[in-house]
Image (spheres, helix red, strand yellow):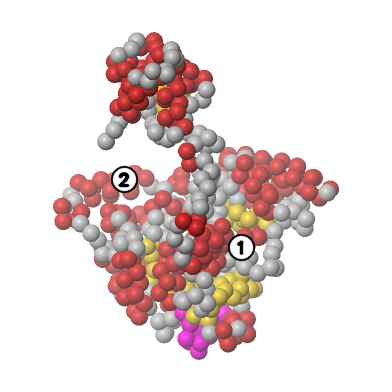
Amino acid sequence: METILNRISRLFEEKKSSKRNSLSLYLLIFNLIKESILNNDIPEGSILPSTRTLANRLKTSRSTIIKAYEQLIMQGYIESKAGSGHRVKNRITDSFHSKSIVFNFSRYPALSEAGKSFQKSVTIMNIFDDGCIAFKPDLPPLDIFPVNQWKNITNTYWRYIKASDLTYSASSGTMHLKKTLANYLNLSRNIKCDASQIIIVSGSVQSLYLIGNVLLNPGDAVAIENPTFPNIHAIFKGLRAHIHAVPVDQEGLKVSDLNDITQQNIKLVHTVPSCHYPTGVKMSLKRRLELLKWANENKAIIIENDYEHEVNNYQDFIPSLYSLDTEQRTVFLGTFNRILHPSIRVGYMVVPYYLLNPIEALLKHSHRFVPSSIQVVLSHFIEKNYLYKHIKNVIEIIEERKKIFYETFENCFGSKLSLDPRSTLSLHTLAVLPEGLKDTALAYIFAKNNIRVYEYSRCFVDSNIKQGLILGVAPVRAPIIKENIIKMEQIFREYSKVQLTE
């Protein structure tokens, strides 16, 4: 492998040997490093050789290298930090990655219909990895995650690891974690399932992708709640399903509207019964039984997405659709990304027996398995009762921060903008915008000020779109909550003046 030092040395010898080269030595070195950065020959974030090391390699004085580096710093190509040396800066606008490349597409194979469909539908999704935490709706209180407990279990795992444990793992997950989850779901959700029915995945999006691929052909009918997660809409649209938007009332998904489209032969119904996203409605027991009855009569499969069930169902417990199902028609989805932290990338689904083999086969054709080390550590984390204690802490913190969030928001915004007075506990809340204001524009302005919110309008499948903001109440501490809500109100006030007077 060629090191940065070797690459600079090679380029220097090539430039130096050129008869046309009449530049002074420091400018020669400056130009070749600058060109290497712009051409991505020296990647962003790379640490350059020390001035002494480079001077020795190029057989020149150290002062020449220092002068070249100073010029690179002045022009913004590198930065110098005490103890860290000289590092190539991240150059967003001029980087190798942002150069526009024009392809003659006629000279390349055409994309598949699936490739085109997913490329188009990805624009619907909520995917932000910009580092903004306040007020991202899908984040738990990250600052209270028990890092030391997790670290201790991880250290113990690696201390006693056997060579045989480092081989491939089962695609559907380690039996250790699956058995632990089967017991956990039995106690926490009254879900009685065999460990073999549990599939370990990286999150709900992967679960939906797997289920959709084993059940749907292009044009097959799927019913989803309206509004709903943009990612749900995107997955089924990418799979080229025929999507039916079913409204939600105060009891949850309106099963009566499903009856109106029975002739469409709906294969799948996706629902979030424990806390509808984003309105917070909890599906009533009566409505759950109606939905199961409808699915039985129409040979359909229900996807029960309980993405925050530890938080939503801690009190006022209502039986899950899966536990009420007597005909193996429900796929139960859960995730630890919402209760622990998103970077853990562990979710699970409980599937009917008849779907096990095709889903496992698809797993073997795709990602193979979630790393077994994480699965074993998570299993011990649950067995040691750390998860239960963490859930209690999370709920207490959410309730505390929600109270501060609502009070600060009301004090700042008054009657200009109000939050949904929901009773169901959740990681997020909803504010519907006054007529004439656009949530996409507001979200964009907030993001430029390091505040991340989701747009309510993106959650709607049909043309009957409402404008609003979905805000996370849990991820940041009280002082940051107050500081950012004050900032939001100032931005909102300026934006409203412009929009409402036009």
In the picture, measured across the screen, residue 68 lies left or right of residue 130, that is left
The reply to whether residue 201 is visible in this rendering is yes
- The disc placed on residue 151 is 2
The kind of secondary structure element at disc 2 is helix
At 42% from the left and 18% from the top, the residue drawn is: 21
- Answer whether residue 296 is magenta in the image: yes
**Horizontal side of residue 210 vs 52, given as left or right:** right
- Position of residue 182 measured from the top left corner of the image (x, y, whole percent): 33, 69
Viewer-proximal residue among 424 and 34: 34
The residue that appears at 70% across and 62% down in the rendered structure is 466
- For the N terminus, the image quarter is top left
Spot occupied by residue 438 in the image (x, y as percentages of width and height) = 71, 54
Q: Amino acid at mark 2?
A: Lys
Furthest residue toward left:
163
- The magenta region covers 287-302
Viewer-nearest residue: 142 or 318: 142
Tell me the kind of residue under disc 1. Cys
Q: Is residue 283 magenta?
A: no
Sort mark 1 into few (<14), some (14-19) or many (20+) by Cα contacts within 10 Å.
Answer: many
Q: Please tell me the numbered disc located at residue 459.
A: 1
Direction from residue 107 to residue 172 in the image, left or right: left
Which sits earlier in the primary sequence, circle 2 or circle 1? 2
